[in-house]
Structures are given as C-alpha cells and as structure tokens.
Image: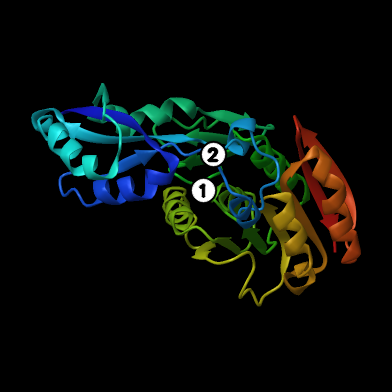
Amino acid sequence: MNWIKYSFRVPAEKLDIVTAVLTDVPYLQGIEIEDYSLTEEDCRALFVDILPEELNQKQESIPISFYLSEDMTEKAEEIKTFLRPFLCQEIVFTTYSTAEEDWANSWKKYYHSFAVGEKIFIYPIWEEADHNYPITIGLDPGMAFGSGTHETTELCLRALEKYMQPGDQVLDVGTGSGILAIAAAKLGAGQVLAIDLDENAVKVAKENVEFNGEQTRITVRTGNLAEGVTAQYEVVVANILAEVICLLAKDIKKFLKSGGIFITSGIIADKVGAVEKALTDEGLKVIEIAEKGEWRMVAAHA
C-alpha cells in the first residue's frame, strides 16, 4: 500500500493546539513534528550543553506532517476544516508519496556489518555473521542507541576486550541496544546486569540478548543509572554523557569492587578533564584515556 505524506507549517505558538487537533482525528495513525529548538530546561534535563547551531535557534514556524493511505486522500480537505478555527492562515499541504515498506526498512541502509579489532564481528540481524571471528554479535538496533558503529561504542568494546577477565561480574549502565552487555557475556563474563532508563531501549536490549542466546547470563531491566543496584561488580561500563558520568562517579564505589575497572565513554574531548577529576575525587586511578575522532574513553581502577 502507498501512503501520502501531507506537510505544512504552523506558527510555533500554535503547535500544541494543532497537535491536539490532529491527535483527535480517529483515522490518523500518527503525526510527525520537526521542532529542532530546545529550551534551557530541556538542555539541563538531557545533560546537553553542546548543540548543533540549529538547535539553539528558536523556530518561528514548525513543520508538521501526517499520513493518509491513497484510498483516503479525500480526508485531507476534512482535516483542513478541523484546523481552520485555530489558524489565521491559508492551509497549504505539500504532498509526498511513499511506499509502506520504505517506512519499515529504509533506515536499515545505515547499518552494516563491521569488525572491532581481531575478535569481535558485529552485524545487523538482516545480514550474515562472519564466523571467521571468534565473537559475533547480531543486533537489531531499533530505536535504541548503540549499533556499534558509533565511536564511543567501539571505544568501550575495545576496553572490555582489554580489561575484562573471564568470570568477571559486569554492570552495564545505560545499555541502549545491549551491545556492551552482550559483548561482555561473549567475552566470558560471569553474570551481566544491564540497565537503561528508556523502556524502549530495555525492550530492544532484551530482544538482542535473546537473539544472541545470552539470556541466562544477562539480566536487562529499567532503572535510573545504578539506582537500586546492591551488588558489587568487577567491571562497570557506562557509555553515557560526560555530565551523567560525573554524577555516577559519586556512587561508583557502592557497586564497583576494590580493584575493579570502570570503563566509560560518551565523552567529548573538552569534557575528559572533568570526568577524570570526578573519578579521581572518588579515589579511582585513571589508567587509560583512549580516543577516536572527537570522542574519548576513560578506564579507571578502583
């Protein structure tokens, strides 16, 4: 089935009411809003302080879109009648035809198989594994962060391979797709606890853990950082933002065993000093800072 995408712009101050009107239309399955601006409160909530220029600019009008199947295009005029009482402007839709399978599969073109070092081969589940590598990890990244292609994920994978010992108990904070937890299990970890605040990420991670046959060694659950973690681990890995790492560092000794390793990335170059200080202030000794592009990985001993 083909679908028609209808796009138009609304004044920023009218976005909420227009969204509410469209949400109440029973035959619309969803709407798409391209609002790139973030308030200062948004930035603080997301621990964001470096943004692309367009995110720092307030948008005067916001692009908004909805989809109708080809056999329902006459409903577009009806939708205009719903919107007119709230908009002091002529409503003009820009239309674009798209096939249903494009929605389901077009994003997959951005994910391809690749190797990390000489041991680990990561592949999307719609491609084939390369069994010339001793460790293969199949992933369906879905909406979760962590396909392995991001520099920070690769830095953490290399550090896990370097520092983790067989049988180590591992805590993965901010697991995303579950890639680091799965890698730890396949590298010989004893038990792995993987935590993420995002329920969608937890769902994706559980599916990836099952696909890789590691559900007996990996537990995935929803949680805020390491809240509620009572055990201690030989290895803690966290691929999250620098500001969040600094918060996590304050409690790191509660769940990192003496002599254990903390592996963390998600750190841009000019934040590495703050992360290093946060860790040393808690009594950890930084043993490695690795880099890839603008990103850094910090490994520290408890």
Q: Which residue is mark 2?
A: 147
Cα distance in 3D space between marks 1 and 2: 7 Å
Could one spot residue 21 in this view of the protein?
Answer: yes
Residue 159 location (% of width, % of height): 75, 45
Front position in the image: 2 or 80: 80
Residue 275 location (% of width, % of height): 82, 52
Q: Quadrant of the N terminus?
A: top left
The amino acid type found where label 1 is placed reads Ser
The amino acid type found where label 2 is placed reads Ser
Q: Is residue 61 left or right of residue 57?
A: left
Residue 193 location (% of width, % of height): 58, 64
Q: In this picture, is 171 found above or below 17? A: below
Front position in the image: 202 or 161: 202
Q: Quadrant of residue 3 in the image?
A: top left
| Residue at horizontal 29 percent and vertical 40 percent from the top | 87
Q: Which residue is mark 1?
A: 177
Front position in the image: 170 or 2: 2
| Residue at horizontal 32 percent and vertical 30 percent from the top | 8
Label 2 sits on a secondary structure element that is loop
Residue 17 location (% of width, % of height): 33, 50
| Residue at horizontal 31 percent and vertical 29 percent from the top | 7
Q: Earlier in the sequence, mark 1 or mark 2?
A: 2
Q: Is residue 177 left or right of residue 236?
A: left
Q: Is residue 139 left or right of residue 26?
A: right
